[in-house]
Image (tube, rainbow, N blue to C red):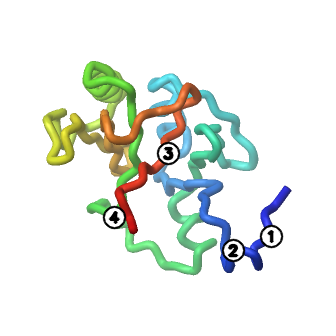
Amino acid sequence: MVPDRRRYGVEVEQRISLITLGVADLARARAFYERLGWRGQEVEQTVFFQAGGLAVVLWSRQKLAEDAGFTDPGGDGFGGMTLAHNVRTRDEVDEVLAKAAASGAAITKPARETFYGGYAGCFTDPDGHVWEIAHNPGFPLGVDGTITVPDFGRT
C-alpha cells in the first residue's frame, strides 16, 4: 500500500529504485561484478543486479548519456559520486577490498580509520565508478544488509 502523500506533504517518495552505471564495455563490466560474486541477468544489452531493495544496472555509457539527454565527452575523471557498500566488521572491509583488487579493481584509498570512528577504503571498477567499502559502527546493518539512518539528535 502506498502511503497517502497528501497526509505527509511529500511529493516524491524518499527512495532510490535503480542505480545505473554507464560502462564502456558491457561484457567486461559484467565479468568484473561477477568476479566480486554478484549474479545478474542481461536483457537487451543491459545487466541487472539485485542489490538489496534496489538494483544496480550496467548499460552502455553512450546509450545512458543519450537517454538522459546528454552528450558524453568520455571523461574518465571523478564524477562527483561514490557508491557505498557498508559491512559489519573492519576485517570485512579488508576482505572486500582484497576481493575487488583480485577482480581487477584499482584501490584508490587503502582502508584506514575514518573521522567518524569507522574504517573504510575505496576502489574504482573498470569504468572508474568509485566504491567506498566501510564499517561504520554508527550505521549498524540489519540481517538483510540494510542500514537505517540513525537519529542524529534533531530537535
N-terminal of the pair, mark 1 or mark 3, is: 1
Query: Given contact means CB atoms under 8 Å apart, are the residues at marks 1 and 2 in contact?
Result: yes
**Which residue occupies 15% across, 47% down?**
115
Return the residue at label 4.
79
Q: Which mark is residue 148?
A: 3
Q: Which mark is residue 4?
A: 1
Identify residue type, mark 3: Thr
Identify residue type, mark 4: Gly
Does 111 sit above or below residue 83?
A: above
Q: Quadrant of the N terminus?
A: bottom right
User: Which of pointers 4 and 3 indicates the residue nearer the eye?
Assistant: 3
- Bin the neighbour count of mark 4 within 10 Å (Cα to Cα): few under 14, some 14-19, many 20 and up: few
Q: Secondary structure at mark 4?
A: loop
**Which residue occupies 66% across, 76% down?**
10
Does 82 sit above or below residue 123?
A: below
- Residue 102 visible in the current orientation: no
Is 79 displayed left or right of 32 in the figure?
Answer: left
- Closer to the camera in the image, 141 or 53: 141
N-terminal of the pair, mark 4 or mark 1, is: 1
Q: Secondary structure at mark 2?
A: helix
What distance separates the C-alpha of mark 1 from that of mark 2? 7 Å
Q: Residue 107: horizontal and vertical position, in percent?
A: 22, 37
**Which residue occupies 33% across, 41% down?**
138
Q: Residue 13: horizontal and vertical position, in percent?
A: 67, 67
User: Which of pointers 4 and 1 indicates the residue nearer the eye?
Assistant: 1
Q: Which mark is residue 73?
A: none
User: Which of pointers 4 and 2 indicates the residue nearer the eye?
Assistant: 2
Q: Quadrant of the C terminus?
A: bottom left
What distance separates the C-alpha of mark 4 from that of mark 1? 36 Å
Return the residue at label 2.
8
